[in-house]
Image: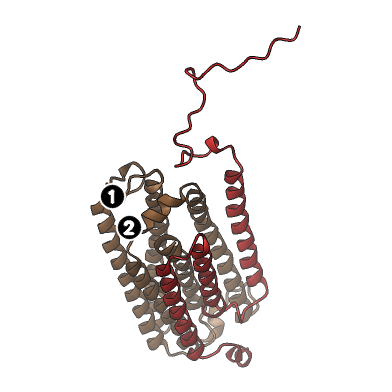
Amino acid sequence: MPAAGSHVAHHFPDLEVQSHAARLGMWLFLATEVLLFAGLFTAYALYRMLYPSAFLGASKLIETSMGALNTVVLITSSLTVALAFHYSRQSRNRLAALLLVVTIGLGFVFLGVKAVEYAHHFHEGHLPGRFYHYAGLQVPGAPMFFTVYFLMTGLHGIHVVIGMGVLTWLAVGAWRGAYGGDYTTPIEVGGMYWHLVDLIWIFLFPLLYLI
Amino acid sequence: MSAETEHKHAGPGRYLAVWIALLLFTALTVALGRMHLAGSWGLLVALAIAVVKSTLVVLFFMHLWDHGGANRLVLATTLVFVALLIGLVLLDSATRFPLANPPTEATMRLMPPGPGAAPRAVPAAEP
């Protein structure tokens, strides 16, 4: 484990102050992320209010079991990230790295399930706006449901991919023993990003799949 | 510092307990979704469960239970602005003249008065 002092930037008096600053900075960044998604949640709320029956009908075209499976996958990946942080604090760096790799694997599972769903929607014509051509549900508002659906799950999927990139970088660092003991800020902050991805999905799942 | 922070950070048992609780709430929300509760109750119950689940994630996975202070203030401020955004947009749209919203099932058949509309009574000009 490297000496804790080497990680403190010169403008911080000690590691604890630096950790607090990093944590607060991450919460501020996550605030901007939440507000980014809030715009799409607002669009969802508005169009759901305008087209209640179309949203009800269109959400039945999305397979609930796939969304439930992905919910379980993301919740479990949140657990593995939290455990990686825990073992990194105990300087069990290899175990932390392995848990991060498991998390990345669960990210791939999530994207795979999403790809199967997207392929089905493309095949059936459940597409946004004027590209919507599903004959089974021709009501005003159904194309708008899929516009909102693809925007929300698409932006969320981009965040999953970015999170997997961050976790890869963290896993390499953890394996090499760059973190551990008192210095676990990168794993904590990177983990918070992954938890945010989980948080957004916790709201997307009932709104899009269950209604 | 480590004695204090070690004390504040619970072991993996707490993470596992939160994970099990999240799985149970997921099963609950799926089961309730299958029941198709009347009216808007389904949406309200699903959102309530989502709020409980996200509270668990924020408090225990994101450690807001242990790290309070400014971090909690940032999150609370964020939620206020989310509520303002969604609330005010919905209030605006819900209280508009219906034809000022995008066409819906309710307003598609209504037509705004155009050139072919019946002539309205023009009030006589004041002398």
Give whichever of B92, A57 is nearer the camera. Answer: A57
Residue ID for mark 2: A61
Residue A7 in the image, given as x and y percentages of width and height: 53, 79
Query: Within 10 angstroms of label 2, few (less than 14), some, or many (20 or more) residues?
Result: some
Amino acid type shown at disc 2: Leu
Q: List the single residue furthest toward the right.
A: B127
Helix, strand or loop at mark 1: loop
Quadrant of the image containing the C terminus of chain A: bottom left
Residue A32 can be seen in this image: yes
The chain shown in red is which?
Answer: B
B37 or A93: which is nearer to us?
B37
The chain coloured brown is A
Give the residue pinned by disc 1: A136
Numbered disc 2: secondary structure: loop
Label 2 vs 1, first from the N-terminus? 2
Q: Residue furthest top?
A: B127
Chain identifier of the residue bearing label 2 in the image:
A
Where in the figure is residue B33, as x and y percent of width and height?
43, 68
Give coordinates of residue A197: x percent, y percent.
Answer: 45, 67
In which chain is the residue bearing label 1?
A
Q: Is residue A171 above or below residue A154?
A: below
- In the image: residue A69, left or right of residue B60: left
CB-based contact (under 8 Å), mark 2 and mark 1: yes
Label number found at residue B7: none
